[in-house]
Image: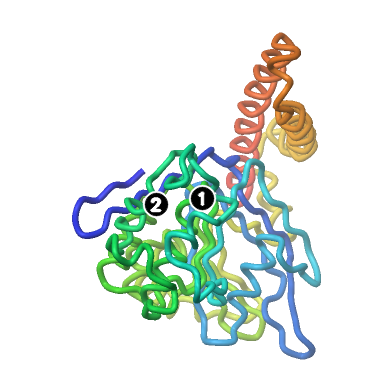
Amino acid sequence: MVRRQGTADLALDSGQKSGRLVIEAKGISKAYGENEIFSDLSLKVVRGDRIALVGPNGAGKTTLINVLIGKEASDTGTVRRGTGLELAVFDQQRETLDPDASLWDTLASDPELGVGGRSDQIMVRGTPRHVVGYLKDFLFDEAQARAPVRALSGGERARLLLAKRLAKPANLLVLDEPTNDLDVETLDLLQELLADFDGTVLLVSHDRDFLDRVATATLALEGDGKATLYPGGWSDYRRQRPERDRPADVKAVSKRTTPPAAAEKVSDNRLTFTEKHRLEELPGEIARLEAEIAKLSELLSDPNLYSQNPVKFQKATDALGERQKKLAQAEDDWLRLEEKAAI
């Protein structure tokens, strides 16, 4: 969690940790008629990655994000999402605010925030917060709390929506042009929050300084269906791109990008027999553990289980913790072996 004293004071908590593997895309493609957005794209996103998507307007950055998070389907290939994901999306469409509602009502009436025991409190990432105090974190004064949304400027409305998004627990943040209309103070705070956020971030922005300060990798949509992953932010991407002058059928891949099938045959020799066998077994083991975790989580979601059968509750809790640890280890093993095979 990050706290900053000053005019604005924001806090961003990633909530529960997601699994080690957040998203794995294999051979995905998307086209609208003859317009090919991306083709044969393979990508691994692991916990803690902050990936910026860049490209000209209309290149398909939002479409690719929607495919990765499951909002849209790809034309080819598969997308697998990891366990324990809590998604928060701040996109260009920005939900419509009721112009007649006050800032107070906009937050307090949000069912996802809930009421923290008193009518003047909301649950901010599971912790009761006074509505006025939370609004002050986002540069609103007490007088504005009861003012209607219609009285806000465009930047203030964006800030109010940001307050709603950041109040909810999330370990996967999707930020599609989040800097539009934000004032300098709020933008600086958002950059600091994301830089230290221990969850995962998918980000679209035309603010190059913002990308340099936040992104750990940059996925460039370069036209003709090409999408290439580069380490670092915008400046790193620009420095590396000229070195990519190579035939169109040769793709630049990051350490975390699945290699083409032809390359896998060569790199397989780098694994021992035991490692090859383990790599083949891991997808099935991960799927089994995910299914068991889902069943145990469903069992523990019963609010009456503890009072009616405390022994069963404790056994299920212990079993869930054990399987979550095994899943994390299996995903770490799988990523390590995949990367070793790709060297």
- Residue extending farthest to the bottom is 34
What's under tag 2, amino acid-wise? Val
Q: Which residue is mark 2?
A: 131
Left or right of 9? Residue 163 is: right
Residue drawn 45% across and 55% down?
A: 166
Q: Nearer the viewer, residue 98 or 243?
A: 98
Q: Is residue 330 positioned above or below 100 on the image?
A: above
Q: Nearer the viewer, residue 190 or 272?
A: 190
- On the image, the x and y values in percent for residue 228 come to 56, 71
Which structural element holds mark 2? helix
Q: Earlier in the sequence, mark 1 or mark 2?
A: 2
- On the image, the x and y values in percent for residue 89 come to 56, 62
| Quarter where residue 262 is shown | bottom right
Q: Which mark is residue 168?
A: 1
Mark 1 vs mark 2: give the one in front: 2
Which structural element holds mark 1? loop
Q: Is residue 277 visible?
A: no
Q: How many marks?
A: 2
What's under tag 1, amino acid-wise? Lys
- Residue extending farthest to the top is 311
| Quarter where residue 39 is shown | bottom right
Residue drawn 49% across and 37% down?
A: 117
Q: Is residue 8 positioned above or below 147 on the image?
A: above
Residue drawn 73% across and 20% down?
A: 305
- On the image, the x and y values in percent for residue 331 come to 63, 38
- On the image, the x and y values in percent for residue 119 come to 47, 45
Left or right of 84? Residue 145 is: left
The quadrant of the rendering that contains the N terminus is top left
Q: CA distance from mark 1 to mark 2?
A: 14 Å
| Quarter where residue 139 is shown | bottom left
Left or right of 192? Residue 35 is: right
